[in-house]
Image (spheres, grey):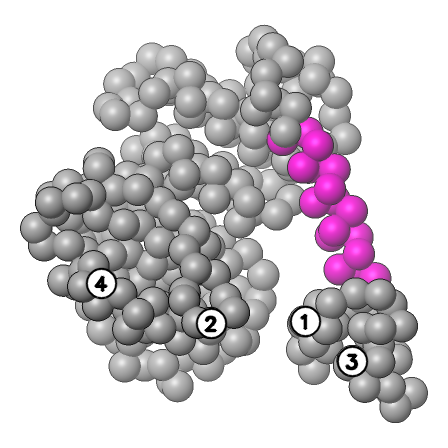
Amino acid sequence: MKRDSIYYQIFKRFPALIFELVDDRPEQAHNYRFESVEVKETTFRIDGVFLPPLGATPRVIFFAEVQFQKDEGLYHRFFTESLMYLNRNQSEYDDWYCVVIFPSRSLEPSDTRTHRIFLNSDQVQRIYLDELGTPNTLPIGINLMQLTIASNKTMASQARLLIERVQLESTGILPKNEIIDIITTIAVYKFSSLSREEVEAMLGLSLEETRVYREAKAEGRVEGREEQKAEILKAAVPLLLKTGMSIEQIAQQLNVDVEAVRLAAQQNS
């Protein structure tokens, strides 16, 4: 299951959810929009930017990163891209914050010294989903995000309890049917091999053949294949490097991107 795809959908539908997690909530939090933005004259795109509404005072931009894999280069990349965006768009903001979401502390980069000026400041907040509290005792928005880290064993029961809460409690500005759609999407991603009937039985509700269900099912299969491909690369790349092949040669031989090979090499270093 590729959680960053799930989080893109969650934040795209409910941008205000990010402010359930952070300490600094802007006055017009419910009017923010979540975007994937391209930094001009560079070759990268930032996928998690929360932009303030027109007329907001002050204009505060939030950069968010959801990280469910070990990546020692995360902070180098995240802060560089965020500052590059700020440099290119100086007229669009008065202040900025960064939010990094991990399922647990174990996936945080081990080097927290190099970027200590950011990590120790009040402009950067690190969130560990498994430390937020017991599922179904926190606000519904946070429970929704915690559902993405539920184990296969507890996923069904947590999802059913969350659906019951959504149906019985006030969800504020979050539409109930949209929240249930997201819960369904998470379940389909996590259990892409199950039929619709099996997902219905697991969640205790009736699903129609909606666009959300069909897209999640199709993408879940694709993500499953991508995860298999990543595992194969992780095993093959170290062996090929020992033969004297360069990363570029391995990428050409395996018909994959150079960055994918480089990541596999880093994971085994």
Q: Which mark is residue 259?
A: 1
Q: CA distance from mark 4 to mark 3?
A: 38 Å
For residue 178, what is the image quadrant?
A: top left
Q: What residue type is disc 4 on?
A: Trp
User: Magenta segment range?
Assistant: 216-232
The residue singled out by tag 4 in the image is 96
Give residue 7's position: percent from left, percent from top: 47, 44
Read off the residue under disc 3. Answer: 248
Residue 134 numbered mark, or none: none
Q: What is the CA distance from the residue labelled 2 to the residue labelled 4?
A: 21 Å
The local secondary structure at tag 1 comes to helix
Circle 1 crowding by C-alpha within 10 Å: few under 14, some 14–19, many from 20: few
Residue type highlighted by circle 3? Glu
101 to the left or right of 169: right
Marked residue nearer the N-terminal end (3 or 1) = 3
The residue located at (81%, 73%) in the rendering is 251
Which residue is depicted at the point 14% across and 62% down? 94
